[in-house]
């Protein structure tokens, strides 16, 4: 293993011989078994254990539930065409509740192996992971897994198997074309003949691609004969003749880019700084001798080493003992240890150059942080496709454990940033929001077992959004000392602009400087050029515009105004739920000329009260989270499914009968989905399954809204006076 580590370190210094890749797919399509076999082929674990050990499922709950919950990084050496390549691989979760881990992994890699089950085909989460990859300009290749099921269970002929492969391949290419940016939709199509599509059985450790079949003289008929012979040794021989690691890693080397190629087109997408600056050029060229640029994508708390920050080196060389700067936290830190991954283990090294996936210790940060030597423009924030929609109140069983619980929750939100934590240090009750019931169940379980803290939680609560339906009149916000007045107007954000923000076509964040790329994006979203120059902040699907003219002190107060704009967008005036699709314009202001009379204590209440009052004038509404579900059920139970959807205020969108199986798509309110899994099982004799296709927030029925607003206010102990309305 020491020799293996030396090889890893040696190859890591040549970025052209590195491939940074992720494995992603729908749940239960075989990713972790697939990763095991790649590791075994690279000599990093026993072949006998491959597919059974699931070495990348580190946590006990992953093994007991048989699902991947956390992404895991490994490195392996692959020899092909007389050269050695370092493959840095991240195995990602398939369950939609843990999709945040997939999004963060995509920032660290340049290529993705998209797995699809040969029997089930392209599923909703396959589409989601493709969307996550292409959003970060990560190039996909396709592996069709579980081919043994087509032979042993479905008894398909070679022609029928090819037909099945073609269907999956065409569907994946259609998705790439639809989701990818225009210039990559055609360029990144997978190609069976060229070999960017492979198929096989991760469980039985074999794989094939068309170029490999030609080279080795293997046909579809040979595979079917091997399984149908009745002799296990025949299909086991396939694993010797066409080992999965050789075919798949060969496909990775040939069809996925190295860091030098990838960073040329990825950096302009994921970093908004000046590409012509020294730092910009170092990032785009993956320069190991340039300025340090490292992005943290995952934090793991190790009992011995403390916080390990894993991520991607985009430029420079990370050395042990380096004094670094954390750009989002605006503070200095020191790198105490540097790790490379050797299989699933971490090996300490002195330094690692650009183009690698590495770990560092000693730095206290969050995923998404940009680590440099001096202040630089940070990388784009890592945005998740779906928002947390289920919340639980959590408190320690023993009141004396409150300080420990606060520390544990801070750790949890670092390890999984798609969990949203609101800590109330006074009452001891805090809120934890996640993607679904399973997500919160896992977090609660880990707090109790891995962090050794006994906690009590409330039943799940749904997270709503607040919005407005019309333009308000101009409303005044007055400072407590009566010396400052600010005038606000709010209106609904246009659908076209909101969709552009959600798709990352318009970048979020405060506008710090003249940003021509932002102006262009806003104008493409339908805004006129005059207004685009006045946009000061885009925050969680809301927009702030400075509509003032010739105001002398505006630059001195604008940061305070934006602080409170974001504060109201986090907690709206109806029931302190997050605001959505709101455009706020500061129309005018009368400010005291002495700065001492317009500090935070004066400006914060004026801005907060002014925006809230304007929103209450704009016919505020509550939006409830909706999920589009794909439900696969035996055809005999379609009547029961229709009844179940109706009983839960759902809307049946489509029903596709595929023989013995019916695929149903339905839009369901998340509030009605508590206990959905058991309801679905009992309605379908235990044979129905469902997956999330999409998520949105939609206007709630007016009769229901008043009741829900009252429930939320009662739960939060809110009065109208506390809401400032």
Image (cartoon, rainbow, N blue to C red):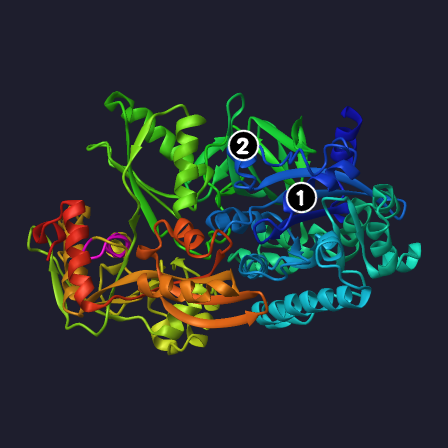
Residue 209 in the image: above or below residue 37 = below
| Residue at mark 2 to residue at mark 1: CA–CA distance | 18 Å
Residue 36 image offset from top left, x and y in percent: 70, 39
Which one is nearer the viewer's eye here, 387 or 208? 208
Q: In the image, which is nearer the foreground, mark 2 or mark 1?
A: 2
**One can see residue 594 in this view:** no
Give the residue drawn at x 77%, y 44%. Answer: 205
Q: Callout 1: few (<14), some (14-19), or many (20+) C-alpha neighbours within 10 Å?
A: many
The spot of residue 35 in percent (x, y) is 68, 42
Q: Are marks 2 and 1 in contact (CB under 8 Å)?
A: no
Q: Residues within 10 Å of mark 2 (few under 14, many from 20)?
A: some
Say whether residue 268 is visible.
yes
**Residue 518, position as x, y percentages in the image:** 45, 66
Residue 662 place in picture, x, y as percent? 53, 66
The N terminus sits in image quarter: top right
Q: Is residue 670 left or right of residue 318?
A: left
Q: Secondary structure at mark 2?
A: loop
Residue in view at x 41 percent, y 41 percent: 329
Looking at the image, is mark 2 or mark 1 earlier in the sequence? 2
From the image, tell me which residue sits under label 2.
59
Query: Is 362 left or right of 200, judged from the image as shown?
Result: left
Q: Is residue 569 magenta?
A: yes
Instruction: Quarter of the image for the C terminus: give it.
Output: bottom left
Q: Secondary structure at mark 1?
A: strand
Q: Which residue is mark 1?
A: 89
Q: Is residue 673 magenta?
A: no
Q: Nearer the viewer, residue 141 or 455?
A: 455
Whether residue 711 sits left or right of residue 341 in the image: it is left
What's the magenta region? 564-575
Query: Which quarter of the picture shows residue 137?
Result: bottom right
For image coordinates 63% across by 61% down, the residue present is 121
């Amino acid at each position: 293993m020491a020799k293996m580590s030396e090889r890893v370190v040696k190859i890591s210094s040549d970025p052209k011989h590195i491939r940074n890749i992720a494995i992603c797919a729908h749940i239960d399509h075989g990713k972790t078994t697939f990763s095991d076999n790649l590791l075994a082929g690279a000599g990093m674990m026993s072949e006998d254990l491959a597919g059974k050990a699931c070495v990348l499922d580190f946590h006990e709950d992953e093994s007991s539930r048989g699902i991947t919950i956390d992404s895991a990084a490994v490195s392996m050496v692959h020899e092909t065409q007389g050269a050695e390549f370092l493959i840095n691989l991240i195995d990602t979760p398939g369950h939609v509740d843990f999709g945040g881990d997939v999004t963060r992994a995509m920032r660290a890699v340049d290529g993705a192996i998209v797995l699809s089950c040969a029997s089930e085909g392209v599923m909703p989460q396959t589409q989601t992971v493709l969307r996550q990859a292409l959003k970060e300009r990560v190039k996909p290749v396709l592996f069709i897994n579980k081919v043994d099921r087509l032979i042993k269970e479905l008894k398909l002929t070679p022609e029928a198997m090819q037909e099945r492969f073609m269907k999956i391949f065409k569907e994946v290419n259609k998705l790439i074309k639809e989701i990818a940016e225009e210039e990559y939709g055609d360029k990144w199509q997978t190609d069976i003949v060229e070999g960017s599509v492979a198929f096989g059985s991760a469980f039985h450790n074999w794989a094939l691609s068309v170029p490999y079949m030609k080279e080795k003289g293997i046909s579809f008929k040979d595979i079917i004969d091997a399984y149908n012979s009745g002799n296990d040794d025949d299909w086991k021989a396939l694993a010797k003749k066409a080992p999965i690691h050789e075919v798949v890693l060969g496909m990775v080397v040939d069809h996925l880019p190295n860091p030098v190629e990838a960073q040329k087109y990825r950096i302009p997408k994921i970093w908004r700084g000046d590409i012509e600056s020294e730092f910009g050029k170092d990032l785009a060229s993956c320069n190991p001798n340039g300025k340090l640029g490292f992005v943290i994508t995952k934090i793991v708390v190790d009992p011995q080493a403390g916080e390990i920050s894993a991520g991607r080196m985009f430029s420079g060389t990370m050395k042990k003992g380096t004094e670094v700067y954390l750009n989002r936290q605006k503070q200095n830190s020191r790198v105490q240890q540097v790790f490379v991954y050797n299989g699933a283990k971490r090996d300490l090294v002195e330094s690692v150059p650009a183009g690698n996936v590495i770990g560092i210790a000693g730095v206290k940060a969050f995923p998404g942080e940009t680590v440099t030597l001096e202040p630089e423009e940070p990388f784009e924030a890592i945005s998740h496709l779906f928002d947390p929609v289920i919340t639980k109140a959590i408190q320690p069983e023993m009141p004396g454990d409150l300080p420990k619980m606060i520390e544990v929750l801070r750790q949890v939100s670092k390890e999984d940033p798609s969990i949203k934590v609101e800590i109330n240090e006074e009452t001891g009750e805090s809120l934890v929001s996640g993607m679904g019931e399973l997500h919160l169940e896992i977090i609660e379980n880990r707090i109790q077992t891995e962090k050794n803290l006994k906690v009590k939680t409330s039943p799940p609560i749904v997270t709503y959004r607040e919005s407005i339906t019309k333009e308000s009149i101009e409303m005044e916000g007055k400072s407590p000392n009566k010396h400052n007045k600010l005038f606000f107007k709010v209106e609904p954000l246009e659908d076209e602009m909101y969709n552009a923000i959600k798709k990352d076509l318009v970048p979020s964040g405060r506008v710090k400087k003249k940003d021509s790329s932002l102006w262009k994006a806003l104008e493409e979203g339908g805004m006129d050029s005059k207004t685009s120059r006045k946009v000061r902040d885009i925050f969680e699907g809301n927009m702030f515009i400075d509509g003032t003219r010739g105001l002398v002190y505006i630059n001195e107060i604008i940061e305070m105004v934006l602080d409170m704009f974001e504060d109201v967008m986090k907690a709206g005036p109806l029931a302190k739920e997050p605001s959505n699709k709101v455009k706020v314009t500061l129309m005018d202001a009368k400010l005291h000329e002495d700065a001492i009379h317009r500090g935070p204590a004066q400006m914060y209440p004026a801005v907060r009260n002014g925006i809230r009052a304007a929103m209450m004038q704009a016919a505020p509404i509550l939006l409830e989270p909706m999920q589009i579900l794909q439900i696969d059920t035996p055809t005999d139970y379609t009547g029961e499914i229709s009844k179940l959807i109706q009983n839960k205020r759902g809307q049946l969108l489509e029903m596709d009968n595929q023989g013995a199986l019916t695929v149903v798509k339905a839009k369901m309110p998340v509030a009605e989905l508590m206990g959905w899994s058991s309801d679905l099982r009992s309605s379908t004799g235990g044979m129905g399954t469902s997956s999330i296709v999409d998520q949105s927030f939609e206007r709630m029925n007016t009769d229901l809204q008043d009741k829900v607003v009252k429930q939320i206010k009662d739960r939060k102990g809110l009065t109208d006076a506390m809401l400032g309305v």
